[in-house]
Structure formats: C-alpha cells, structure tokens
Amino acid sequence: MTPVEHSQFKLDDVDTFTVGARLFGCGGGGDAGIGRRLARQYFTDQAVDVLDPHLAAQQGATGDAVALGIAGAAAGPLSEQLPSGTEFPAVVNRFTSMGLDPQAIVALEAGGLNGLAALAAAAQVNLPVVDADLSGRAIPSLDQLSPAYSGASLLPAVLVDSYGRTLVVEAGTGTAGETHGQASYLEDVVRATVQVAGGWVAVGIPLGSINCLIDLVVPKVMLRVLQWGRILENVHSVAQLQHHVESRGGTIIGQGSINRIQRPSSSVPTGWFTVVSETSLMRVDMQNEFLAVAVDGLIVSTTPAVIGVLDARTLLPLEADQIRTATDVVIMTLPPSVPQRRTEYLERTGPRSFGLKFEVELS
Amino acid sequence: MRIGIDVGGTHTDAVLMDGETVAAATKGHNTDNLADGTRAALNSLRQDHPFSSAEIDGVMIGTTHLLNALVEAHRLAHTAAIRLCLPATAAFPPFTEWPQRLKTALGATGHMVPGGHEYTGRRIASLDERGLRRLGERLGEEGVESIAVSSVFSPVNAELEEQAAAVLAEVLPGVPVSLSHRIGRIGLLERENATIINASLRLLAGSMTNVLSQVILECGITAPLFLSQNDGTVMDVNAVQEYPVLTFASGPANSMRGAAVLSGLQDCAVVDCGGTTSDVGMLRGGFPRETPSFVDVAGLPTNFRMPDVVSIGLGGGSRVNTGGDLRVGPDSVGHRLGQEALIFGGKTLTTTDIAVAAGRAQLGDHSCVTSLEQSLVQAVLNEIDQRHIAALESMRSGLGEMPVVCVGGGAVLLPDYLKGIGPVIRPEHYAVANAVGAAVAQVSGEVDRIFIIGSSARQEVLQQARQEATDRAVASGAAPASVRIVDEDAIPVPYLPSEAVRIKVKAVGDLRIGRSAPRTEVRG
C-alpha cells in the first residue's frame, strides 16, 4: 500500500499550500492569492480528505471523479470580477443531473490558482480531493491536460460563469474517440466563452470512475505542492534551500539581479528576462509561465520541469508579473511529477509545444 | 527655499533646504501634540537660520499620525463600505479578512448591491438608485460618518462609482464618500481595503491638516503645505483631506530619498538607524527598491507598493541588558534617551553609551562610561555590527563591496567599515535625512489599467498611457518640463481576444511651486 503521509487538508495548510502553488505555478497559472482567499473562505472548521489514486484503485472506490478549475484571464479580470461562490457547486450539481456520481475532486493544475480552487471546491461540496492533477505544473491550454493524451474524453464539460450562466459542451458523434480533437475544441469553446463571460469561467471535466483515475492523472502533485510550501516557508538561506532542492533531485541554477525584461506580446509570444550574477548570465524564457532557463547560452532546464524564480530575500516564489528589473532572485528547478504516459506528457508539455525549438531538459 | 518636517515615532526633525543644500536643521523630541511639535520645529529652524515668509516656497511634512491611528484602531470614523458588484464577487463580501478589532473600531458594515463592469467596460448590472438611496437612509440612521464605495473594474470605468457618490451626497449630505478608482489599482479587494482605510481616516485627516495649516500660518508662513506620500512623492493639503491613505507610511521612502540627496549616491545600501529600530533598504538610481509584491497595512492586504525594507529591533536608544546572557534591544528608552542614558546622567545602559565608550560617537559626558568593561563594549559592538551585516547581506544582490549610507539619529552606532559589506558613509546632516527626503520630494502621476490594443499599435497605446501618467503628475503640481517616466511595464493579459495588456506607468516631476497650491488629482 502507498503510505499516505497527510490524509487531510486543513485550514492551517492553506497558506502553506499557497506558497507551494506559486512554485508549481512556474510564474503563471493564475493568481494563487485569489485561490488562497477562496480556500480560506470555504475551509472554515472543516478538513478536506485527500484521496490517493493508487489506493482508490486498490480498494475499489466507487463513484466518479471530476476535475474542477478556473480557465481564463485569471490574473486580471478574476482579481476584479471575483467569483460569486456558486460556480463550483453549480458545476458539480450539473454533472449529477447528467447522471454522474461525483465523489472526488481533481485539480486541473495543482500549481497557481487552480490547486487552491480545487481545495476550495472540495470544501464547498464536501468531497475529498485527489492527490493528483492533470498537468504536473501550470500550463496554459486545456489540450495539454493529461486526459487529452490518455485516450479519455474531456466531454461533456461544464462551464459556469460568475453570473451563474451554464454551458454544457457535449461531444458530437463524429468526434468520439478523438480525444485530442475534443480537447482542442473544448479549448476553443472556453476561449470564446471567456470573452463574453467577464474574462474567466469555472470549468468541470468528467474523469470517469475513481477506480481508473490513476491512468488519467499526474499523481502525487497536491501533497508535493504542500511539502514544497512547507520547505519554502522554513528555509532561511540559499544554502538550506539548496540542501532540500538537491536531495529531491532538483538544482539551484543561480542567484543574481534581474537586469533586462522582454515581456511576451501577441507578435512575440515568448518573452524573457535576464539575471546577472558575479559569474554568469542567466536567461529565463516565458509565456504565461516560465518555460526554460539558459545559463551563459546553454539550456539547463525546460518545461515540464518545475521552474521557480524566488525573491532572493524572502525565498518565496515570484509570479511572472512580479518580475521587475533590479529584483534579486534565486532560480531553481525541480523534476516534474509524471503521469503513466510519460512520452506523450513530455511531448504535450515540453518546449516544442510552446513553439520553442529545443529539446526537453529535466535535469 | 523649502521646509521639510518629519514627525516620526520619537523625534520631530525639520530642515530648511536651499535647493539640495541644507541651510538649517533641527531635531526635537515628540510631544503628544502634533501642533506643538511642528510649531517648535519651525521656531527652532527660524532661530537657527532666520527667514522671511516670502523666501519659503513650500512646507513638506511626513507624519505617522494617521498610520498610528489605524494601528491603534483609535479615532477612526464610523465607516460603511458599499460595493457595486452583484451578482459577481459575492464569495468575498467587504471586510473579508479584516481583523475583528479593526472592524469593531470602524463600526464596520459592508453592503453589496448590483453594479460594476467587466474588463471590457461592459456593465455587469446597472445601479439600483432607489435601493442605494434606501441603504443610504438606513446608514444615516445608524450614524455612519464616512462611506467607501467600490465598483468592479472601476479603474476601467468609474461611472457607477461617480453615480453612487451623487446619490449618497443627496441622501447623506456632509458624509464624505471615498471612491475606489481614485485610490487604488486593479485588484478589487485590495483597492476596496485601501478605500475603506481611507474613509475611516477622513475625519482625522481633516482635523490634522487643519491643525498643521493653522500652525504654519501662525508661524507666519504663507507657502503651500504638502504631505509626503507612501512612495516618497508629495500631495497638497487639500488632496490629503480626501486621500489620506496615500500619505500614511512615508517614513522609509523619505529617509532613503534623503540619504540619496545627502550622500550624492544613487546605488547603495541605506541604514536608517532611529531610536528603537534600524531600517535597512537599497537605493537604485536614487530611488528606494520596492517590494516585489503588495504590502499588508495593519494586517490588511492593500495594493500599495512600499520600499523594500528590513527592520531590526536595534537603535540608538536600545537597552543593553547584561543580566544573564547579553541582550541588546528590542526594548528601548525611545525619546527618553536624553534623560535615561548613562552619558546624559541617567541609569540605563544603552547602545549609544556603548558607542561613546568605544569612541564611535562624541556625545554627552564620556566620563560616565569609562568604567564599562572593555569586553562588554566589544561584545555589544559586535552584536550591533553583526545584526546590521546580516540584514545588509539579505538585501544585497552582488558579491562585491557596496557603500552603506547610514542616516538617522542612531547612525553613530555603526563603524566606518562593515566587514564583508563595505564602507559606511555618514553624510553631513545624516540625523535629519527623512526631513531632507520630505523637503526634496517630487510629485507623481500613475496609470495602471488594462488596455485593449486591438487595431491600434502597441506603441501608440503605451504612448497614451505615458501621456496620461504625465498629465496626472502635472495635475498634481509637477512642472511640465520636468516630468519623466520612472517606471513602466506592459504585462499581457493571457487568454483574451485581440491583445489585452495591463499597462502600468509612473511619471515623476519637480514640484511647480506657487503661492496657491494646484488642485491635486490622484488616481490609480
């Protein structure tokens, strides 16, 4: 049996999880601060049980899992047009009315906003959260989610906006089995929907029986996020951090001061910033998230590795819009958690999926 | 010439500045009465360097008076918050995450009504004027003294906040209404929090500015009065009455700007060593390095950015406790240093006594500390140095030496060189650097909102944002020719059609001084 070191999330874990969520957000994945508020709002006295997908399969758990999260322009519009609080229960209720038996919540992404949104949703609807997500680290597009390359359907998906308006996206007869085509279609529908829905929507994706979940998800991510939150909250020096990072297969790439920033734009989708240290020049490529790190021109880490840019003074992760010149930073990387379909995962979330012409580097 | 005054925790410092030269400086102990301290500082300056009213172009004051009121939850107005938002945002009502003590002090009530806009400027819902009128009447019966109004995406479209203000002015004439789009940036809860804090300080700010205006008039000064803002720029006294929240934490920015002016250095570390604490920060290009994220004020998340400063509980008045293990601070004799320190005939061993015994400072009666054991003196000096070195190490970005400009009344505590860090520079008039920072302050204008670039070129939109920031700086009193853009960022908003970009621009210029201060417009 897989040992479960932490079988519940409690209110006290929310702030710690937020720190870890910022690390696994890799600079993007939405505003973890809003996720933190959502989770704090709904946790109150209750705890959320954590379901290990391996154990669930071994023990023959019953019922269905649903993935929940927020898609859209989470950093800007969501920080103003905040949720009404009815979105996630509405998604779950709609699945129930469609004949599903939702018994567990899975985060679209553990990193950024959505890991916390899943915790909030689980607390709201009083269901356990699965120690897994569909991405390993924050990613920008629904067609990069693990079910999209695991032979499962992402449909029927349910979208609910802050007005309470609901959209059910069903598969047509011709698209059955073409999961990637479905995922791209869902991505297109969501992008079109957020334009008329205030910039974001709550998204629900059915994942089928909890028993078979392990085939579809990136396991062990939620508790890993909490663990890293705890580490980052407790380290006081780069040397201490280095010990934790290296003992878990990661690397401290370097430390220095940000001297130039080129933000992404519609014409140049990949931006970058450079960090100078006494001995080297580091460059971090970014779109919504940090995608790759080069040291003196040599690529040393790429997506889907977890790339963290930490404020050098507090050793807390920065989001991409906090990247400002003259900020002193530490750049670190961790190996990703991987789903069963490792090859497809690296293909779907590696640098080439973002239009970058270099190979995956996970060291 | 300008007069700069800093009313800190223990001292009121004042300087008379001729351009960037200190013509006179004074340092006095605080009294409980803001008027008395300010009057004493002005009189002392005049004694030191006689001046006529006509010679003074402006009086700039930085004070923690309002921040203290907030931290102590004392003298705050009975405040209601009205948010125009429904059906959105209901998951987080006004006063979410507020400490109960502060909510009680405000007699806080939060209300959500239909309204607000989407990021595109499209309305979420129209304002229910009749409903708002009824709410206003009810609040009036409950004795509300000040109201904060926020609306979803008001930095994009402020029409509903303005409309609500007009309705409330009819129902509750005389009750000040603070509008969120005038105060903060994008980020509803943080902007709303800042607006509520602002509303709660309106009555106190009114009486404080009246007192200060009266004092400078009594001292025969007819020049306009300005107050320091949190970012180290200034706003005129009329604007402070409406936007007090923007002025309440100016201390760190003022002392760091003062350190830059006094030392002539643009890139260095700054240690502001006061009576009880020592603040360590970094200057980049003559301006304080700011925190990468927004800061909490009195336990509340706001969308203010402040200088990135590490505070250590060690200053010139810190007690040296020799019973058992040696302990230096954090308890301090504060403004009673002049009576309690050994060198001034008192009975308390303080860090200043140690500095005098070690020859780092020439103050008071040296003979009172000659009997101190050399090993004790060395141990305390070592503690002082090591704690500053640790704080400076945590702030630095490079490995090489960096100059450390040391200012504030406790600056004598530090040696001339900090091992592993660099030389310590104590510029002339170091003790009154924050008053110097207040006096030389510029004025600013900011833009922070989402622009839909669409068919127009990105450069045109950026230029439009720069012009808006410049116009705001000029409206706040900047001389147009002096305005320059000091900070600019264009962050793409992912997942939206065409190209939505959040553009933040800050413009700063020299104050255009005239006998009647320009009307300040402050907008986020």
Image (tube, rainbow, N blue to C red):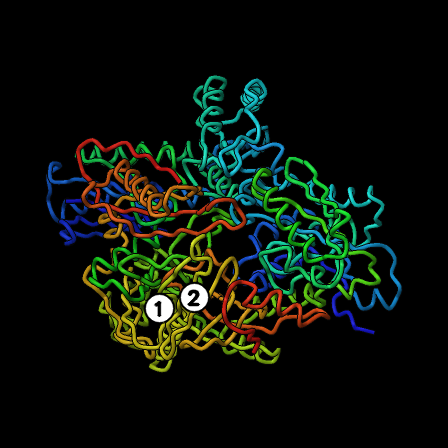
Q: Where residue B116 sits in the image (x, y, percent)?
A: 53, 32
> What mark, if any, has residue B351 been given in the picture?
1
**Residue at 46% across / 65% down in the picture?**
A285
> What mark, if any, has residue B253 been given in the picture?
none
Residue nearest the observer in this picture, A214 or A321:
A214
The lab-note entry on whether marks 1 and 2 share a chain reads: yes
Can see residue A44? Answer: no
Question: Which is nearer the N-term, disc 1 or disc 2?
Answer: 2
Residue nearest the observer in this picture, B292 or A197:
A197
Give the total of numbered labels: 2
Kind of residue indicated by mark 2 = Gly
| Left or right: residue A55 compared with residue B329 | right
Q: Up-down: is B413 above or below A134?
A: below
Kind of residue indicated by mark 1 = Thr
Instruction: Name the chain letter of the residue that bears numbered label 2.
Output: B
- Quadrant, the N terminus of chain B: top left
Q: Up-down: is B393 above or below B500?
A: below
Residue nearest the observer in this picture, B244 or A93:
A93
Instruction: Name the chain letter of the residue that bears numbered label 1.
Output: B
Q: Where residue A96 sits in the image (x, y, percent)?
A: 82, 44
Q: Where residue A333 sits in the image (x, y, percent)?
A: 54, 72
Q: Where residue B95 sits in the image (x, y, percent)?
A: 57, 40
Residue nearest the observer in this picture, B417 or A77:
A77
Find out whether the residues at labels 1 and 2 contact each other: C-beta distance under 8 Å: yes
> What mark, if any, has residue B329 been given in the picture?
2
In what element is the residue under mark 1? helix
| Left or right: residue B157 compared with residue B250 | right
In what element is the residue under mark 2? strand
- Quadrant, the C terminus of chain B: top left
